[in-house]
Amino acid sequence: LKLLLSNDSCAEGLVSAQGLKVLYTIVNRKPKKTLTLALDTLKTAVLKKIGMINRAAIDLGLIATLLDILNAGTELSYVEDITAARVHAIDIVKALSEDPDKGPMVCALLEDSEVWQHCKDQRHDLFISRGPFVDLRIAGPEPAAEDGTADRSVL
């Protein structure tokens, strides 16, 4: 599927054949083995900057789902390669925020997101590993200890 997305015509066909909706459904379910792959595939689609793909992704509610993933913290620790999944989510949000038609609406949503304020300026490509990996928390606010200080034991 990712290879097909490298071709503009195939990428547009994905949207018209409801393929984007299938990918969104997978991402929304947050499955252990395929979330990272689904996000990587979606990222390939939105980085093509084909308006109909990006608008369809936004209309499906992908921004809210991606922000949920970024805000989930340890709730998604069961997902294989969750660090890469978070990186892909951030890259997708950034790409969708640049859409000429719906980008301003996306940016307005992002302004109200605390988790987005914590991760929007980070450079995330440094966190993707090609081999064995250590799960790093790269998005979202630090958990607070009972005394209000940052609890670094969970990082």
Image: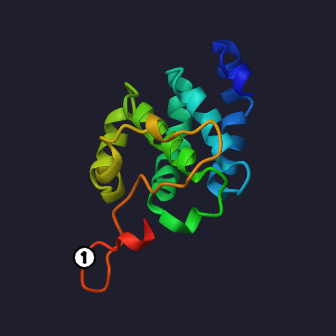
| Pick the front one: 140 or 108 | 140
Quadrant in the picture for the C terminus:
bottom left
Residue with the mark numbered 1: 149
The residue that appears at 72% across and 43% down in the rendered structure is 22
**Residue 150 quadrant:** bottom left
Amino acid type, residue under disc 1 in the picture: Thr
Q: Position of residue 24 (x, y in %)?
A: 64, 45
Residue 17 position, x and y percent, is 75, 30
Seen as rendered, the residue at the extreme left is 148
Taking 50 as reference, is 57 above or below it?
below
Percent position of residue 108, x then y:
29, 45
User: Front-most of 105 and 120?
Assistant: 120
Display coloring: rainbow
- Residue 24 versus residue 136 in the image, above or below: above
For this orientation, the residue located farthest to the bottom is 146
Q: In this figure, what is the number of numbered marks?
A: 1
Q: Quadrant of the N terminus?
A: top right
Q: Residue at x 65, y 57 (%)?
A: 79
| Residue depicted at x 51% and y 56% | 69
- Circle 1 Cα neighbour tier, 10 Å, few/some/many (<14 / 14–19 / ≥20): few
Q: On the rendered structure, is 151 left or right of 60?
A: left
- Residue drawn at x 69%, y 49% as measured from the top left: 26
Q: Is residue 109 visible?
A: no
* 49 vs 104: above or below: above
Mark yes or no: residue 73 visible. Answer: yes
**Secondary element at image label 1:** loop
Quarter where residue 6 is shown: top right
Expressed as whole percent of the image width and height from the top left, the position of residue 152 reads 36, 70
